[in-house]
Image (tube, rainbow, N blue to C red):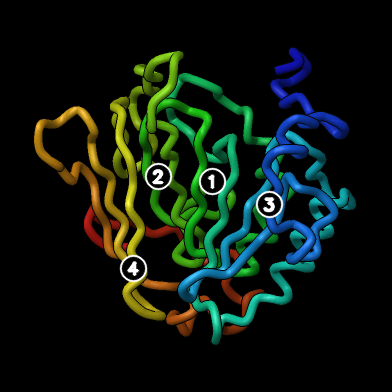
Amino acid sequence: MDGHGGKPLLYPHGFKAYNSRWLMPYEESGSPSNLYYSFDVAGVHIVMLGSYTEFEPGSAQYRWLEADLARVDRGTTPWLVVLLHAPWYNTNMAHQGEGDSMREAMEELLFKARVDLVFAGHVHAYERFTRIYDNNANACGPVYVTVGDGGNREGLALSFKNPSSRLSLFREPSFGHGRLRIFNSTHAHWSWHRNNETNSVVADEVWLESLVSSRQCMGDLDSYQDSQSFSLNKDEL
């Protein structure tokens, strides 16, 4: 953090070692940078975004994301998933606000494209949110999941804000891992497994319906950008 309004540091010419050793399919997806790219697998279009390179409107990453989302064929890849590092929504005390500027720049693009899921890391804990757009529950927004709890030398981020946000449905500062299973074009299952159990334990799970199957969300997008907030239970989205 740079101390100026909590904005993350950007490294337009950094990550030289990473870029030299870990080549991602950025050229295949029309990206100018190894730090953001996309690919298709098993009916899912997966978009990897870079939290530590330029992302504001007009930047190379923003223009690439706009073009990449416009090319998605939801008939071929009905599920649309985005991954990034610094979470856009976070009730943990660690890394508060570090994803805010990126969210403010790019969230509308994801909402209009009807992204189903957004996964983040960075915070060493687990948290699952309801479907959100612009800090409000929205039936046509993505489900946001922070799964930065795979293990690290710094330990867990143990403290969450209290009281919790109504947008946060499950949160726990434990080491664990997640599993996303795509069953068909309309249904998927997400589960989070706590690692410190003797036996495998599913600590959190939810069935998901793809937004492509929603007549409301795939209709006239402009008619639903201001859709009313709604409440969801823990077991169904």
Q: According to the image, label 1 marks what residue?
A: 135
Name the mark nearer the viewer: 3 or 1: 3
Drawn side of residue 113 relative to residue 81, left or right: right
Residue that label 3 marks: 24
Mark 4 surroundings: few (<14), some (14-19) or many (≥20) residues within 10 A: some
Whole-number angstrom distance, CA of label 2 to CA of label 4: 21 Å
Where does label 4 land, which residue?
Answer: 188
Residue 167 image label: 2
Which residue is drawn at the image coordinates 74% and 13% (left, top)?
A: 3
**Amino acid type, mark 1:** Asn
Lower position in the chain sequence, tag 2 or tag 4: 2
CB atoms at circles 3 and 1 under 8 Å apart?
Answer: no
Q: Position of residue 87 (x, y in %)?
A: 55, 38
Mark with earlier residue (3, 1): 3
Q: Secondary structure at mark 1?
A: loop
Horizontal and vertical percent for residue 112?
Answer: 65, 67
Amino acid identity at mark 2 = Leu
Residue 145 vertical position relative to residue 42 in the rendered view, above or below = above
Q: Residue at x 63, y 52 (%)?
A: 48
